[in-house]
Image (cartoon, helix red, strand yellow):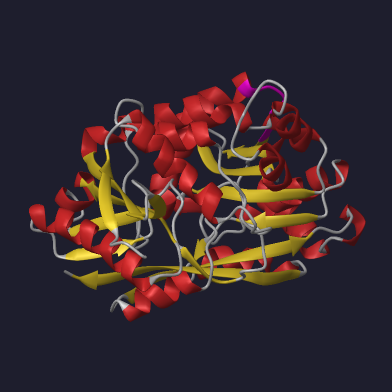
């Protein structure tokens, strides 16, 4: 006999752990789902561990049937978005569910009720607390593995959204780019890179140790604000978030994969962050980072044929002036030196055509699409 579905708010440490571990059960037989690190997920949602709660409220809900978890969802309010950007929106994220529309509806209804408590007018997701969290339901590319910073879901997720009256709010695209040897790479990029460096009297910075990057991190986040503040989904990054991301993610950075460009006055005008792909390592670790299985992450950092292109920031004064050709020329050399042949891009907003033009000189394929969904409440 099937019992009724019960929605319970996660409040204790045990609840948070159950909330984080549910996707491991849901996707245990899915070869395309790449698990996150359980510790990182806990640090993100726990109010005692994530400083984002200085400007955010959140509740985390679990759906139970017959005593088993069958779904989860987070309800999030970002007060900067509401007060400064004037978007009356409750966010939903960390959304995972069995293929049962009733479960999805009850989870979504829980978020809507949370939003109504604050008289909010729109529900939108899946998103996180800010732009630096994972976002977007996969709507194409279900036979592709997600990266360390993207989500995976089955096709029925978006069907549930449509059945519940949601519209698409924003679309993202992701590309897989083939890297040839440097001699075969586009001559146009190599020539243009040298020309732009000389025209604007720019200097490329290469790093060998993580401590060499630290003096530029704050400038990188400032440049992110300047690069993306006109996009529809952008929310200003707060200082406490920067410190938190430094603490949590700097350990995963291989300094060889960070490229910065400064002008003649020493100001940062462009940067890019690429990482070796951690996809295979995360599959082997299965969410548990221990002394022994950290070997897989370390190996992935230094011996890998795939990489992930995470972030690029360009000062507005230098946008559309070919600065990115310098970055790509240097990354080409790096990838060849490390025998990397495939690079995946981070999700890019579909309307962000300036970024997508960067791939036109390389053999590439659009292999994933994702979307966020919204509706009035």
Q: Closest to the observer: 172 or 215?
A: 172
* Left or right: 322, with 229 as reference point: right
Residue 175's quadrant in the figure? bottom right
Asked if residue 355 can be seen in this view, the reply is yes
- Which residue in the rendered view is the most extreme toward the front? 1
Q: Please state the horizontal and vertical placement of residue 122, each as a whole percent of the image.
A: 20, 65
Asked if residue 351 can be seen in this view, the reply is no
Stretch of the chain drawn in magenta: 205-210
- Residue at screen point 79% across, 33% down: 299
Q: Does 198 sit above or below residue 370?
A: above
Q: How many marks?
A: 0
* Left or right: 107, with 171 as reference point: left
Q: Is residue 102 covered in magenta?
A: no
Q: Does 163 sit above or below residue 94?
A: below
- Residue at screen point 22% across, 63% down: 109
Residue 206's quadrant in the figure? top right
Quadrant where the image shows the C terminus: bottom left
Q: Please state the horizontal and vertical placement of residue 361, each as a whole percent of the image.
A: 73, 68
Q: Does 226 sit above or below residue 170?
A: above
Q: Please state the horizontal and vertical placement of residue 306, each as a whole percent of the image.
A: 77, 50
Quadrant where the image shows the N terminus: bottom left
Q: Is residue 207 covered in magenta?
A: yes
Q: Closest to the observer: 262 or 347?
A: 347
Q: Please state the horizontal and vertical placement of residue 8, each as a whole percent of the image.
A: 26, 47
Q: Closest to the observer: 336 or 120?
A: 120
């Amino acid at each position: 006999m099937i019992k009724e579905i019960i929605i319970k708010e996660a409040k204790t440490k045990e609840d948070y752990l159950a909330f984080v571990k549910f996707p491991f059960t849901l996707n245990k037989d899915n070869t395309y789902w790449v698990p996150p690190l359980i510790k990182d997920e806990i640090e993100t949602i726990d109010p005692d561990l994530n400083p984002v709660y200085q400007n955010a409220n959140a509740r985390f809900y679990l759906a139970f049937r017959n005593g088993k978890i069958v779904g989860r969802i987070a309800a999030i309010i970002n007060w900067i978005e509401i007060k400064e950007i004037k978007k009356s929106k409750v966010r939903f994220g960390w959304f995972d569910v069995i293929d049962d529309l009733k479960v999805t509806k009850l989870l979504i209804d829980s978020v809507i009720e949370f939003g109504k408590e604050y008289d909010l007018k729109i529900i939108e997701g899946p998103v996180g607390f800010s732009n630096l969290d994972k976002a977007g339901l996969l709507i194409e590319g279900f036979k592709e593995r997600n990266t360390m910073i993207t989500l995976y879901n089955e096709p029925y997720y978006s069907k549930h959204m449509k059945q519940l009256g949601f519209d698409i709010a924003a679309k993202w695209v992701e590309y897989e780019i083939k890297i040839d040897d440097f001699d075969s790479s586009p001559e146009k990029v190599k020539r243009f890179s040298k020309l732009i460096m000389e025209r604007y009297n720019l200097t490329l910075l290469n790093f060998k140790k993580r401590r060499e990057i630290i003096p530029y991190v704050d400038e990188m986040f400032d440049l992110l604000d300047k690069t993306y503040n006109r996009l529809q989904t952008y929310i200003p990054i707060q200082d406490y978030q920067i410190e938190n991301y430094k603490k949590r993610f700097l350990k995963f950075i291989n300094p060889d994969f960070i490229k910065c460009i400064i002008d003649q006055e020493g100001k940062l005008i462009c940067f890019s962050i690429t990482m070796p792909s951690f996809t295979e390592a995360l599959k082997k670790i299965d969410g548990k980072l221990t002394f022994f299985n950290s070997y897989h992450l370390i190996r992935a950092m230094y011996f890998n044929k795939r990489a992930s292109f995470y972030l690029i920031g360009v000062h507005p004064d230098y946008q559309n002036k070919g600065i990115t050709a310098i970055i790509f020329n240097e990354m080409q050399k790096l990838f060849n030196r490390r025998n990397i042949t495939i690079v995946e891009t981070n999700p890019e907003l579909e309307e962000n055509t300036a970024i997508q033009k960067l791939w036109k000189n390389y053999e590439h394929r659009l292999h994933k699409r994702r979307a966020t969904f919204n509706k009035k409440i």
